[in-house]
């Protein structure tokens, strides 16, 4: 078995594709050596050894032999000897997992130094100061990362020495001072561990290798892995590399750079360096590094080499690289190259420009930008430089950050907005009545509710930041204040919310508003060329539909008609309809609503210009539209005080009774969806009439429309067949009336488990399916959509569930029902068109899942359309 891979000086054994075995750093060092780029020679001990060691606590003898052989080879190519007193080989030891992983042991430099070899180094380099400077650095790093001694002990001793000598910079310490520091450091090690610092370089190396492997399982690394979904079975490699010195004087130095600007993506070499320094000096920030452009003047030849190398690396890896280099007495060495981390804006710019430069193809570019990055580009974010304190965290219900004055009612929000005040609407939960206030606010904060609660769904539709279910906030509506962790916030005080993280901050925080660039359109157009699944939007107003079209929506996958019933002009008629004691009165009220609904649908059809529009008939429980009990009680009291007429008071009392009679114990499972349509058929009849009349009218003006009428909350095929029969009759009679004939579809939502399980029967009646994964998640888990905010965050925090299933589709459970629904549905209607319109339709992993199980399209809120377009393309690649 091969456990150790050599690199450098034409003896390189590894390559870039061996990241699993050599780790990212090791594989890239090998690749650079293969490219003829100067890297200090060394070797990589594989991740396999890490796993063996962690399992057994020891190494197979083969490993020890291979390490010894590699050291001998290293001695040969460098002409130095490990542990030699006259010409010592010094090495660095670094960890290197498949992906770079903060939290693990990082680096030990200058390993191999001891009381004897330091003398050799001093003579050989003819620089005693340099030798002892290297030795004290080694002692610090070895003490810190291998022996686990607190770093500050070394720092304090060093500072004390500088103070005693009256100097401020490390570089002001001469060889004598450094020698004394070395002695002090050794006694720190002795005092802290009870043992002398190990003088034997072989022992030093062994200890450092053990420390790297052990660091794979330290708490920080475990946490990092958990947060980033990195499997523990990967293990880390160890890279042992011969030292080169950036601290040999004024023709030496070290630096880090990016081949393009990681903040903006601009094509310019970007980085910084320090002369006469070793790696940690650049990071430590004790001395201020110079911008990389200065190197061109200081050491023009090294700069020219560096320029050639970074271009070569970018050409080779075909991506922006993050590089580390050291210049030893004018000679440049590369210590590392890796794919550079970048901001969302930079990722986009680099991806598009690299296609234009011919470096990568469009498909590759599509994979270079994550859907989450697109999301960040579409919403304001909190300035990463800003300082602030998070006082509470709720659910990240709708992305983006917002700042504004606290208001507690929708009306107040609207009033303030009229005066150009920016407000954050703070509510226990929102209801359809709050729409106007939500629209007027910069952002919404709710105490209750989950990821598919009213506030979350509506805010996402508006592209407005929302933190939902922030349970540690307590509202005192009478005092017009809310309190959270000992702070009381009054109406009018500023708060900042971050709907991407769920954070609440008291006060104003600086926000960054991204500029959407042409590059986004370019990338998304490429995504459209690749993806096979359609992307529609959930929209209930012409405005939202327009926004969605600008984002590239190819139709409306869900128009929630109940959202249309809340316009100020409609509420009285809607209430009349609901309060009607008999069918005749209800029909009269519906007659008033008909022209308004027709207008609504015409508005949508016009914006969509012939693209498919799925209209869902009324879904929610009727009492949601009614005035609240307290409101009526107030009204009654007022009438009493004013001496209102008995008749007036009687009406209010009747309304109160009716409202009370409609209250349901569990409205989510109550009288809603098709159940309403079945018990009050005149409601759906009016809606279908409005749809067909609207289409007829537009047809006359030459617009081609194929309305898709969708029945919600079907659990049994009979519910659909009976509703459909009525609707078809209405549709046909309206067409006959208007002497107008066109195709329309009647389909259903699949949002209850029974519907998914009997989809074969349902598909015989339904001309299309749209999975309502919000309700399907609610009913599959038995988690109330509106109350899940109380326990789901706890579930996720404690790994009972990996994600909130209302945000990320539960593929095993809910997803399995979707899969069964598709399979069964297509078994009786092979060409069944199937989409998804729950909130998961715009969530990247759910979009990918949807593609894999055969959805024809996804439908999501307007601001998530770009995300879905990209995710759908990535699913294909
Ligand atoms: C659903 O249940 O997934 C759905 C889209 O409908 P609503 O959210 O309106 O219940
Ligand atoms: Mg639903």
Image (cartoon, rainbow, N blue to C red):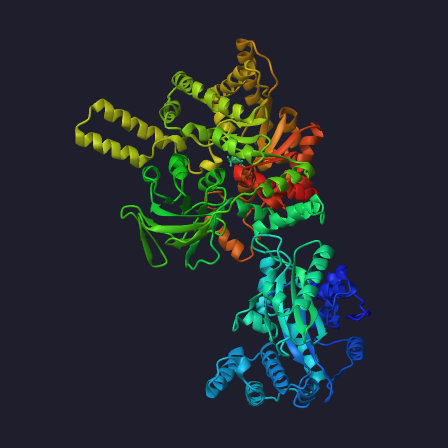
Residue at left offset 32%, top offset 39%: 419
Looking at the figure, which quarter contains the C terminus?
Answer: top right
Q: Is residue 644 above or below residue 332?
A: above
| Residue 259 position by quadrant | bottom right
- Along the line of sight, which residue is nearer the eye, 578 or 616? 616
| Residue 637 position by quadrant | top left
Q: Is residue 655 above or below residue 240?
A: above
- Along the line of sight, which residue is nearer the eye, 527 or 802? 527
Residue at left offset 68%, top offset 66%: 336
Residue at left offset 60%, top offset 31%: 554
Q: Is residue 747 above or below residue 485?
A: above
Residue 106 seen = no
Residue 347 x/y as whole percent: 61, 51
Residue 171 x/y as whole percent: 55, 80
Residue 410 x/y as whole percent: 35, 38
Q: Is residue 135 above or below residue 230?
A: below
Count of all numbered marks drawn on residues in the image: 0
Residue 570 appears left or right of 188: left
Looking at the figure, which quarter contains the N terminus?
Answer: bottom right
Residue 834 x/y as whole percent: 64, 32
């Amino acid at each position: 078995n091969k456990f150790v891979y050599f690199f450098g000086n034409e003896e390189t054994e590894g390559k870039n594709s061996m990241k699993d075995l050599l780790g990212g750093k090791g594989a890239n060092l090998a690749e650079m050596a293969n490219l003829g780029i100067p890297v200090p020679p060394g070797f990589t001990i594989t991740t396999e050894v890490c796993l063996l060691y962690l399992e057994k606590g020891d190494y197979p003898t083969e490993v020890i032999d291979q390490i010894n052989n590699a050291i001998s080879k290293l001695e040969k190519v460098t002409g130095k000897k490990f542990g030699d007193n006259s010409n010592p080989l010094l090495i660095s030891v670094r960890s290197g997992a498949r992906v770079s992983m903060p939290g693990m042991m990082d680096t030990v430099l200058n390993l191999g130094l001891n009381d004897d070899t330091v003398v050799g180094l001093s003579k050989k380099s003819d620089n005693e100061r340099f030798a002892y400077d290297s030795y004290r650095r080694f002692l610090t790093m070895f003490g810190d990362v291998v022996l686990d001694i607190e770093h500050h002990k070394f720092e304090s001793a060093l500072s004390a020495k500088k103070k005693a000598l009256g100097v401020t910079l490390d570089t002001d310490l001469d060889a004598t001072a450094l020698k004394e520091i070395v002695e002090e450091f050794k006694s720190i090690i002795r005092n802290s561990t009870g043992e002398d610092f190990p003088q034997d370089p072989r022992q030093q190396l062994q200890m450092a290798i053990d420390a790297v492997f052990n660091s794979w399982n330290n708490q920080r690394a475990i946490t990092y892995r958990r947060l980033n979904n990195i499997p523990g079975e990967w293990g880390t490699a160890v890279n042992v590399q011969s030292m080169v010195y950036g601290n040999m004087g004024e023709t030496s130095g070290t630096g880090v750079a990016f081949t393009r600007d990681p903040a903006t993506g601009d094509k310019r070499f970007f980085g910084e360096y320090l002369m006469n320094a070793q790696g940690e000096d650049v990071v430590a920030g004790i001395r201020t590094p110079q911008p990389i452009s200065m190197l061109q003047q200081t050491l023009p030849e090294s700069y020219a080499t560096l320029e050639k190398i970074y271009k070569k690396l970018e050409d080779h890896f075909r991506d922006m690289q993050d590089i580390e280099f050291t210049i030893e007495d004018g000679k440049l060495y590369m210590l590392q190259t890796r794919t550079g981390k970048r901001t969302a804006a930079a990722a986009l710019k680099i991806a598009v420009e690299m296609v234009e430069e011919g470096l990568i193809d469009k498909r590759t570019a599509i994979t270079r930008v994550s859907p989450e990055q697109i999301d960040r580009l579409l919403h304001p974010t909190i300035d990463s430089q800003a300082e602030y304190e998070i006082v509470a965290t709720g659910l990240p219900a709708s992305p983006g950050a917002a700042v504004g004055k606290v208001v507690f009612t929708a009306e107040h929000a609207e009033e303030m907005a009229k005066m150009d005040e920016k407000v954050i609407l703070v509510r226990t939960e929102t209801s359809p009545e709050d729409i106007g206030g939500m629209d007027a606010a910069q952002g919404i904060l709710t105490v209750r509710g989950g990821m598919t609660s009213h506030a979350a769904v509506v805010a996402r539709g508006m592209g407005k930041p929302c933190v939902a279910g922030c349970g540690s906030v307590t509202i005192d509506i009478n005092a017009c204040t809310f309190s959270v962790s000992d702070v009381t916030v009054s109406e009018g005080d500023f708060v900042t919310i971050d709907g991407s993280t769920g954070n609440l901050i008291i006060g104003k925080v600086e926000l960054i508003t991204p500029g959407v660039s042409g590059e986004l359109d370019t990338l998304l157009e490429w995504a459209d060329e690749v993806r096979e699944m359609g992307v529609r939007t959930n929209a209930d107003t012409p405005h939202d539909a327009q926004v969605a079209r600008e984002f590239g929506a190819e139709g409306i996958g869900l128009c929630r008609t109940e959202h249309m019933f809340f316009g100020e002009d409609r509420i009285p008629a809607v209430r009349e309809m609901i309060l009607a004691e008999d069918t005749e009165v209800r029909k009269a009220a519906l007659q008033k609503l008909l022209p308004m609904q027709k207008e609504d649908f015409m508005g949508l059809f016009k914006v969509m210009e012939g693209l498919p529009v799925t209209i869902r008939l009324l879904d929610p429980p009727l009492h949601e539209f009614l005035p609240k009990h307290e409101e009526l009680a107030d009204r009654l009291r007022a009438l009493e005080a004013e001496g209102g007429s008995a008749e007036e008071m009687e009406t209010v009392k009747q309304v109160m009774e009716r409202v009370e009679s409609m209250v349901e114990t569990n409205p989510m499972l109550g009288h809603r969806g098709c159940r309403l349509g079945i018990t009050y058929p005149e409601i759906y009849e009016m809606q279908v009439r409005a749809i067909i009349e609207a289409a007829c009218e537009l047809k006359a003006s030459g617009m081609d429309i194929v309305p898709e009428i969708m029945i919600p909350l079907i659990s049994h095929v009979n519910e659909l067949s009976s509703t459909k029969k009525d609707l078809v009759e209405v549709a046909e009679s309206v067409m006959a009336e208007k002497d107008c004939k066109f195709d329309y579809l009647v389909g259903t939502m699949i949002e209850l488990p029974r519907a998914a399980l009997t989809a074969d029967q349902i598909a015989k009646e339904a001309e299309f399916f749209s999975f309502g994964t919000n309700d399907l998640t609610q009913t599959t888990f038995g988690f109330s959509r509106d109350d899940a905010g109380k326990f789901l965050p706890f579930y996720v925090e404690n790994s009972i569930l990996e994600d909130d299933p209302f945000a990320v589709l539960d593929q095993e459970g809910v997803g399995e029902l979707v899969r069964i629904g598709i399979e069964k549905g297509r078994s009786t209607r092979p060409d069944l068109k199937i989409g998804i319109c729950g909130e998961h339709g715009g969530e990247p992993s759910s979009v990918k899942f949807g593609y894999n199980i055969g959805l024809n399209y996804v439908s999501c809120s307007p601001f998530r359309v770009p995300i879905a377009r990209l995710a759908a393309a990535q699913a294909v690649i």
